[in-house]
Amino acid sequence: MNIADLITWFEAWANPTWCETWDNCGWQIEPGVLDQKARVLVCLTPSLAVMQEAIALNANLIFAHHPLIFSPPKSLCSGEAIAEMARLAFRHNIGVYSAHTNFDQAQDGTADVLAQILDLHEATPIVATQPGLGYGRVGLLRPCLTLQKLLATIQTRLAPPHLIFSPTADLQQTISRVAVLGGSGASFISAVAKTHAQVYLTADCKFHQFQESRDRNLILIDAGHYATERPACERLVQRFISLNLDWVQLSHQDEDFRQFFQ
């Protein structure tokens, strides 16, 4: 399958027109690779380390969740990250494509994968954007778990370097209804509260957002941006493998960009 056909297949699944106005989905850099057989390196965030990895592996497409360019740069200067990415992309004929908020909403996209990892049943969007699709998922745990067991499950299955959760007097309380949203999901706290979820798993939450959640009787769990979205990249590799591409691999140079002092 060539790159053009791969992108056509993907966009029929996660339509780029679903992209939010502030977002930048689709081609970030297209140096003339559309007719080439797809050799795809999948990553969460396109970076110079990922680009160097793509060069070493003779990939011709970096397929990323996060956009390389969120807003138009005013200049491209040697030594700057985006400029270097563009220089290397054109020099080595490697395209960079991003599927962000369209992939967040899609069936089997970032939200669905997170719900599936926690074995949520009857999962529906936290905020629907169209029938059956939308941001986040809320569903039922069957069987129910104690909060302590749910936290242990999240730690085991997502392996976050740091797991933060709302203070609670009872780790043995029974949890049956859970909401999830990969990446920065704190802005959805009020919407989650309306779903009657007991727990909300997301990332990038601030001090006062934990306070807001407590005031709404919602247990907030922050597992980190990388840990909550990277699994969807792993699943995407499996989808691409099923298409019998010439070559596809998950990046080993993808970064969390954070370290925690033990």
Image (spheres, rainbow, N blue to C red):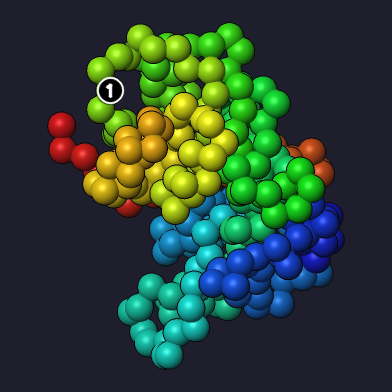
| x and y percentages locating residue 234 in the rendered image | 59, 39
Relative to residue 54, is residue 257 drawn left or right?
left
Q: Quadrant of the C terminus?
A: top left
Residue at 30% of width from left, 31% of height from top? 166
Residue 165, picture quadrant? top left
Residue sitting at the far bottom: 75
Residue at 35% of width from left, 78% of height from top? 80
Residue at 61% of width from left, 13% of height from top? 142
Residue at 65% of width from left, 42% of height from top? 125
Q: 123 above or below 232?
A: above
| x and y percentages locating residue 217 in the rendered image | 38, 31
Q: 236 above or below 20?
A: above
In this orientation, which residue lies closer to the viewer: 216 or 260? 216
| x and y percentages locating residue 8 in the rendered image | 82, 62
Residue sitting at the far left: 262
Number of residue marks: 1
In this orientation, which residue lies closer to the viewer: 67 or 91? 67
Residue 162, picture quadrant? top left
In this orientation, which residue lies closer to the viewer: 254 or 229? 229
Q: Amino acid at mark 1?
A: Thr
Q: Quadrant of the N terminus?
A: bottom right
Q: Looking at the image, can residue 57 be seen?
A: no
Q: Looking at the image, can residue 187 be seen?
A: yes
**Element marked by disc 1:** loop
Relative to residue 255, is residue 6 drawn left or right?
right
Mark 1, other Cα within 10 Å: few <14 / some 14–19 / many ≥20: few
Residue of label 1:
168
